[in-house]
Structure formats: structure tokens, C-alpha cells
Image: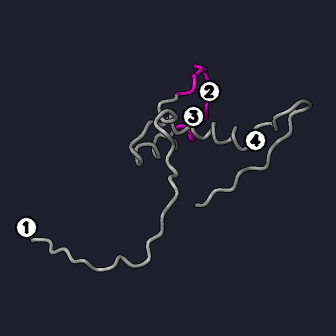
């Protein structure tokens, strides 16, 4: 299967330039400080996360941590003085 590619000098048609949406390497290297906690979860919750983690080839603790981080981001108190207020959850495309 070594088919030779024949290039032509045809116009490319409609080309759309897409804005760079990837974070810079400095943001990828950042790791938030972790705090170890002891937490008792129901067996059914742990079993669920273990099953889903095995399907996606990841660690179940990482999935739980990301779930909690997402919850915190959605309900973080508004910045500023006064009593904390719940922010509306962010809508994401599924």
C-alpha cells in the first residue's frame, strides 16, 4: 500500500482561520496544591466511579476530584465582600 500521492495546484476553496484556543504551556504545567482528606463514600458511589474510570482508562479518585472541582466552579461565591452567594451553574454542551 505505497500509493504515490499526486499533488495538484488547485484553489483550496473556503478556508476559515480558527482562533488559537489552546492554553499556553505555562498553564498546562500549573498544578493546584492538593490537600489529603479522609472521606467515607457509599459503596455504590465508589463502585460507580471505579466502573466508569475503568471504561475511560483513568483513576476513579481523579474522576471524583474533577467532579468536586466542577461543582465548586459552578457554585463558587461571587467575589467581593458580604455573604457568599451561589452562582448559577455554568451550562455546558453535551
Q: Which mark is residue 75?
A: 4
Q: CA distance from mark 3 to mark 4?
A: 15 Å
Write down the region rendered in magenta. Answer: 31-46
Q: How many marks?
A: 4
Above/below status of 61 relative to 51: above
Q: Which mark is residue 43?
A: none
Q: CA distance from mark 2 to mark 3?
A: 14 Å
Q: CA distance from mark 1 to mark 2?
A: 58 Å
Of residues 80 and 60, the one nearer the viewer is 80
Check disc 1 and report the residue beneath it: 2
Can residue 92 be found in the magenta stretch?
Answer: no
Q: Main secondary structure of the magenta part?
A: loop
**Contact check, label 3 and label 4, Cβ < 8 Å:** no
Q: Nearer the viewer, mark 2 or mark 4?
A: 4
34 with respect to 56 (left or right): right
Q: Position of residue 67 (x, y in %)?
A: 60, 41
Q: CA distance from mark 4 to mark 1?
A: 56 Å
Check disc 3 and report the residue beneath it: 65
- Quick one: SS at disc 1? loop
Display coloring = one colour
Amino acid at each position: 500500500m505505497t500509493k504515490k500521492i499526486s499533488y495538484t495546484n488547485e484553489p483550496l476553496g473556503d478556508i476559515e482561520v480558527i482562533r488559537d484556543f489552546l492554553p499556553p504551556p505555562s498553564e498546562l504545567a500549573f498544578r493546584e496544591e492538593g490537600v489529603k482528606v479522609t472521606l467515607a463514600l457509599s459503596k455504590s458511589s465508589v463502585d460507580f466511579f471505579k466502573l466508569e474510570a475503568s471504561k475511560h482508562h483513568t483513576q476513579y479518585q481523579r474522576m471524583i476530584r474533577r467532579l468536586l472541582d466542577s461543582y465548586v466552579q459552578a457554585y463558587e461565591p461571587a467575589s467581593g465582600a458580604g455573604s457568599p452567594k451561589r452562582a448559577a451553574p455554568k451550562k455546558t454542551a453535551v
